[in-house]
Amino acid sequence: MSDLDSKYIARCIELSAESMDKGDAPFGSLVVMDGEIISESSNNAAQKVSDHAEVIALHRAHEKVGHSNLKGATLYSNCEPCPMCAFMTREYKISRVVYALPSPFMGGHSKWNIMEDDELQHFPPFFGEVPDVIGGLMEAEAKAVFQRSGLWMFGKNSRNELKQRLRSRD
């Protein structure tokens, strides 16, 4: 991890707050290639269910570079990409993924491990190599935005929170 990783995750957290301010879920993502942000997006799933911040950022990166091979690029997100976004990341051949909040109930890395599934790379030209994945960077800062939204099921302690919620129902 580097100071640049923190800078880019901070931008994702800003985008997630902007997303929430416009009435959507608090997600933000960007794609960086050669030290330059080539695309960024907040969430738009309230308007179109598949418009997750990562998907939009990946599509915009594709439009900017003119092809779908984003090998060498890093996808940043304030939250662990879901399975749909994880598959898109692998199909765009992203080399590195950095996220803040884990998503133990819906994560494409921690729950379904699409990010590090080495069998996918044996299906070229569809999927890229296994990306380097770093999770938990600036988790507390990202969690603060989620707490404003009422979404509790993200972060390292979300399973404990579920257990507490279930106990309080009894």
Image (cartoon, rainbow, N blue to C red):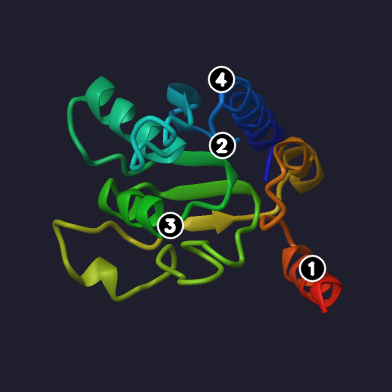
Q: Secondary structure at mark 3?
A: loop
Q: CA distance from mark 3 to mark 2?
A: 26 Å
Q: Secondary structure at mark 2?
A: loop
Mark 1 nearby-residue class (10 Å; few <14, some 14–19, many ≥20): few
Report the mark closest to the observer, 1 or 3: 1
Q: Secondary structure at mark 1?
A: helix
User: Measuring 66% from the left and 26% from the top, which residue is drawn there?
Assistant: 17
Report the mark closest to the observer, 3 or 2: 2
Say which residue label 2 marks: 25
Report the mark closest to the observer, 4 or 1: 1
Which amino acid, mark 3?
Answer: Pro
- Res 142 quadrant in image: top right
Q: Is residue 46 left or right of residue 65?
A: right
Q: CA distance from mark 4 to mark 2?
A: 9 Å
Report the mark closest to the observer, 3 or 4: 4
Q: CA distance from mark 4 to mark 1?
A: 29 Å
Which quarter of the image is occupied by the C terminus?
bottom right
Q: CA distance from mark 3 to mark 4?
A: 32 Å
Where is residue 51 drawn, in percent x and y? 36, 36
Say which residue label 1 marks: 165
Which amino acid, mark 4?
Answer: Lys
Which amino acid, mark 2?
Answer: Ala
Instruction: Of the two numbered discs 4 and 1 on the same chain, state the one appearing first in sequence.
Output: 4
Instruction: Of the two numbered discs 1 and 3 on the same chain, state the one appearing first in sequence.
Output: 3
Mark 2 nearby-residue class (10 Å; few <14, some 14–19, many ≥20): many
Q: How many discs appear?
A: 4
Say which residue label 3 marks: 131
Q: Is residue 113 left or right of residue 58?
A: right
User: Measuring 46% from the left and 55% from the top, which residue is drawn there?
Assistant: 82
User: In this view, which residue lies farthest toward the front?
Assistant: 170
Q: Is residue 92 left or right of residue 150?
A: left
